[in-house]
Image (tube, rainbow, N blue to C red):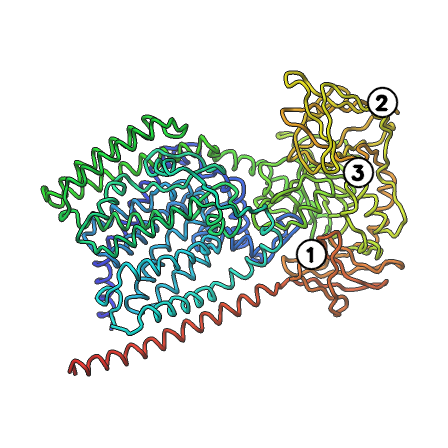
């Protein structure tokens, strides 16, 4: 038995050892590209760029903490006020490669990401090599040439930072092979495995892979429509039965992936589906010549919204692709259908409405044509087949193709594309065309035999390295690749302060749960890396209700992100921000200084009035509609009054606006807003408010607008930064003035007009003493948390007479289940986004448990899918044995 096993292992190694080369070769070239870019340890750079720098690295940090320190994959408190984690996991982290990050210490997280990228690059090469060897076997060196082209295509190199997409590049060849086996031999195991993994590792790109399955099925069947090629068992009604099989096994694969898909779908209902307005117009996205230019090396344009598809996969592919269509050894049906499928993808790219359908019915926010790797796969398969039949071709056709490519390049050069450099793209491409034209002659002629193919392989590797390096340099110039120190140094400065706060809280018998924030940021997801419960966050799996609520509270919050900028002591206390790390001394009269980091000039402050995660409130708090208030400061008054049961509370008082003066300003009106624009573009344009302010009180400004446009802000001629912009569309603290006086607040327009909502008051004073009195009283109804983990909270609360609502700063989610003294309570939504339950006066034990229905239902569907798959395997084994016996009997084989 052991001998048989050893023999099988040895046979497998002999047969597939070239896969190791197919893995190592592109991974090594990719590493050489990063070395040339001076990525650590060969320099100070890193792989952090675009969203990997702004979002994903923080998610990986959170994943690392959950794996090493324990934590739920269902919920996280480090995103804006807390929220489900399955959406983030499904969208960004579900790849098995992601868990390798746990092997790296926190100060080497960037090296963990580098390793993951290199492993995925190698896996793409190995996967493509396996496909070519199984589907269209020829010489192993031929396979290595085109598998390496796939792994180092422009899409694979430029999009490597979108780590969650790359798994589908690994799996696409296996999905294609699975379709072919399902059609030709009724074998379904590889198809179900690869498609379910495509959906499990990235449901978003996996959705696109499902579309590919439908297209590729018809392509492959019609391209090989004869009994010898696609109907090994000589089955009757083969097309209908094959179609039925692809549908059934696709459904099983989707079912297996339901544990990811269903929670992800539920997560998207919190806001991604309304992230942007989609216009299904049948308009052309680009000119065909623009697309053609992207097929050549060094043709990086941009990853911004105007970017074209990344479809480069080697000059050898451009030479051999036309040869595929004129090679008589390849059946005409296959060549015709290949032309059709290439045209289908080109149409999908170029027609806006179809492209939007591919992207999940949402226009991409940057990084267009996210499925263009599928066209790369198809082109490489065709070029590979042409290369395999090169000895039967007419070399004159190769010469003609090379000449045509040279003419096209000259024509492209004449267009003066900003992103097509003369030497970087045109001359490099001409050189490659000439060199490969000659190299292919040696292969065609049979001279030097295998050495000619080896020379081609070496030339391809040199070209791929050069093109990959140029693409990476282009990416750096376009969006800037961050240095390793820009991430690590920041975290190393701030992490000790976060740890200091946690130790302080623990040593002073603090709460089991508390929130903290900081008024300076590297990126919005800092809380995930630093491991504290904050409100700053940025993710595509956003919760739109929380984002809107925090904006109405006066914080910088919109689109898909929130950031702790702006706000007020009232808002901070209501959502339980107990500690604030500041990059300078604050004038905030509410905060109490705890610690000063003299080395970095950081201060740690405590908010002694921060309320618990849950506290007793008046029932009026559930009736308040926050959308009735445009001013965050007016809302804070109303919300405090509702929570306390008062008719009115003047924490923020309007202060007198004496006059408004305009300089070089034109005015107009649009939808509840007054528009201010420059009369003379060459002269300064200002709006100057003269305001009478009381002495000794903090003064705040809140200018509501639905159309953020940044302008400069000055108070008495002293710059206060900007306002009304993306991050400055929020409450702004103007200062404390020693005595009653008049101040001048000046808005200075930049290039764009600004829009200010009419009928609102913009300037308020804050009564700190009244605030302390009210919130000290509210603290008497705080819930004392006796147990806390990500999905289970338990505490005791004493509810004063007159209060019948347990108000929380927990984000409303139907996955929460609340009991009071063991009795299940119906969830109430407050502030359009927070959770509350009814409660009676007196002492109570309250329990919060998070277990979303989407997870339990998704798990059950996945189990059902696995059972169906296992059943199909058993039935298939029985069928194969029966058919084998029948075949043996028919052929008199005993």
Q: Identify the secondary structure beneath mark 3.
A: loop
Question: Which residue appears at 75% of the width and 66% of the height?
Answer: 825
Could you tell whether 474 is left or right of 799 in the image? left
Where disc 2 sits, the SS reads strand
Asked if the residue under mark 3 is in contact with the one under mark 1, i.e. CB atoms within 8 Å, the reply is no
> Residue 336 placed where, x, y %?
27, 53
- What residue is shown with label 1? 812
Q: Earlier in the sequence, mark 2 or mark 1?
A: 2
Q: Residue at x 59, y 42 (%)?
A: 526
Q: Earlier in the sequence, mark 1 or mark 3?
A: 3
Q: Which residue is mark 2?
A: 742
The correct choice, above or below, for 179 with respect to 724 in the image is below
* Above-or-below relation of 810 to 251: above
Pick the front one: 697 or 891: 891
- Picture quarter with the C terminus: bottom left
Q: Earlier in the sequence, mark 3 or mark 2?
A: 3
Per the rendering, the mark at residue 539 is none
Spot occupied by residue 711 in the image (x, y as percentages of width and height): 67, 27
Pointer 3: what residue? Answer: 590
Q: CA distance from mark 2 to mark 1?
A: 44 Å
């Amino acid at each position: 038995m052991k001998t048989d096993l050893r023999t099988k292992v040895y046979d497998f190694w002999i047969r597939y050892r070239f896969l190791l080369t197919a893995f190592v070769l592109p991974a090594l070239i990719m590493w050489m590209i990063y070395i040339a870019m001076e990525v650590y340890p060969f320099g100070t750079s890193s792989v952090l760029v675009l969203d990997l720098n702004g979002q994903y690295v923080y998610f990986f940090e959170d994943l690392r903490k959950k794996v090493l320190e324990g934590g739920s994959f269902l919920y996280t408190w480090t995103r804006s006020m807390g929220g489900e984690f399955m959406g983030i996991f499904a969208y960004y982290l579900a790849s098995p490669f992601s868990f390798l990050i746990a092997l790296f210490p926190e100060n080497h997280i960037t090296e963990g990401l580098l390793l993951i990228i290199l492993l995925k690059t190698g896996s793409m090469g190995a996967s493509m090599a396996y496909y070519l060897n199984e589907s269209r076997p020829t010489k192993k060196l031929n396979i290595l040439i085109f598998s390496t082209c796939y792994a180092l295509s422009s899409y694979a190199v430029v999009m490597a930072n979108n780590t969650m997409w790359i798994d589908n590049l690994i799996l696409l060849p296996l999905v294609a092979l699975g379709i072919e086996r399902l059609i030709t031999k009724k074998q379904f195991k590889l198809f179900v495995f690869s498609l379910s993994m495509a959906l499990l590792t990235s449901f978003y790109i996996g959705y696109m892979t499902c579309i590919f399955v439908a297209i590729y099925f018809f392509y492959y069947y019609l391209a090989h429509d004869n009994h010898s090629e696609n109907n090994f068992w000589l089955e009757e009604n083969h097309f209908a039965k094959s179609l039925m099989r692809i549908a059934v096994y696709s459904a099983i694969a989707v079912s297996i992936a339901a544990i990811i898909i269903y929670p992800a779908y539920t997560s998207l209902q919190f806001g991604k589906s309304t992230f942007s307005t989609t216009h299904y117009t049948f308009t052309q996205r680009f000119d065909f010549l623009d697309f053609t230019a992207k097929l050549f090396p060094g043709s990086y344009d941009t990853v911004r919204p105007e970017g074209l598809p990344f479809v480069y996969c080697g000059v050898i592919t451009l030479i051999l692709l036309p040869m595929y269509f004129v090679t008589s050894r390849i059946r005409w049906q296959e060549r015709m259908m290949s032309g059709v499928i290439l045209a289908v993808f080109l149409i999908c790219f170029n027609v806006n409405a179809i492209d939007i359908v591919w992207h999940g019915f949402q226009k991409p926010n940057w990084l267009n044509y996210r499925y263009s790797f599928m066209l790369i796969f198809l082109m490489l398969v065709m070029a590979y087949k042409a290369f395999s039949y090169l000895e039967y071709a007419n070399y004159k056709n190769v010469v003609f193709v090379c000449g045509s490519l040279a003419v096209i390049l000259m024509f492209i050069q004449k267009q003066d594309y900003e992103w097509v450099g003369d030497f970087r793209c045109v001359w490099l491409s001409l050189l490659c065309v000439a060199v490969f034209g000659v190299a292919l002659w040696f292969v065609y002629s049979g001279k030097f035999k295998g050495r000619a193919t080896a020379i081609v392989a070496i030339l391809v590797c040199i070209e791929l390295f050069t093109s990959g390096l140029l693409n990476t340099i282009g990416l750096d110039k376009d969006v800037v690749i961050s240095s390793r120190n820009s991430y690590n140094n920041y975290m190393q400065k701030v992490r000790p302060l976060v740890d200091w706060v946690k130790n302080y809280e623990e040593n002073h018998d603090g709460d089991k749960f508390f929130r903290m924030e900081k008024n300076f940021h590297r990126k919005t997801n800092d809380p995930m890396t630093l491991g504290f419960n904050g409100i700053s966050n940025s993710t595509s799996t956003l919760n739109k209700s929380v984002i809107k609520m925090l904006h109405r509270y006066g914080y910088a919050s919109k689109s898909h992100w929130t950031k702790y900028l702006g706000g007020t002591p009232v808002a901070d206390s209501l959502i339980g921000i107990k500690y604030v790390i500041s990059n300078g001394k604050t004038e905030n009269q509410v905060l109490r200084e705890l610690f000063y980091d003299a080395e970095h000039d950081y201060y740690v402050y405590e908010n002694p009035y921060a309320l618990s995660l849950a506290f007793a409130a008046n029932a009026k708090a559930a009736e308040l509609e926050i959308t009735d208030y445009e001013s965050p400061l007016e809302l804070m008054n109303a919300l405090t009054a509702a929570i306390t049961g008062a008719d009115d509370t003047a924490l923020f008082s309007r202060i007198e606006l004496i006059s408004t003066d305009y300089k070089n300003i034109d005015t107009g009106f649009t939808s509840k807003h007054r528009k201010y624009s420059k009369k003379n573009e060459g002269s300064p344009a200002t709006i100057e408010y003269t305001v009478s302010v009381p002495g000794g009180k903090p003064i705040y400004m809140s200018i509501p607008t639905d159309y953020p446009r940044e302008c400069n802000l000055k108070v008495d001629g002293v710059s206060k930064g900007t306002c009304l912009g993306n991050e400055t569309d929020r409450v702004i603290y103007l200062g404390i003035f020693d005595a009653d006086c008049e101040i001048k607040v000046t808005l200075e327009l930049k290039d764009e007009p600004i829009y200010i909502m009419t009928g609102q008051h913009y300037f308020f004073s804050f009564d700190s003493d009244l605030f302390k009195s009210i919130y000290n009283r509210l603290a008497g109804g705080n819930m004392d948390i006796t147990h806390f983990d990500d999905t289970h909270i338990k505490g005791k609360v004493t509810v004063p007479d007159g209060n019948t609502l347990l108000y929380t700063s927990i984000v409303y989610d139907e996955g929460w289940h609340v009991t009071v003294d063991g009795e299940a309570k119906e969830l109430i939504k407050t502030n359009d986004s927070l959770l509350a339950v009814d409660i009676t006066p007196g002492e109570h034990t309250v329990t919060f448990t998070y277990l979303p229905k989407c997870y339990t239902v998704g798990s059950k569907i996945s189990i059902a899918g696995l059972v169906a798959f296992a059943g199909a395997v058993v039935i298939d084994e029985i069928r194969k044995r029966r058919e084998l016996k029948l075949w043996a009997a028919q052929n008199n084989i005993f």
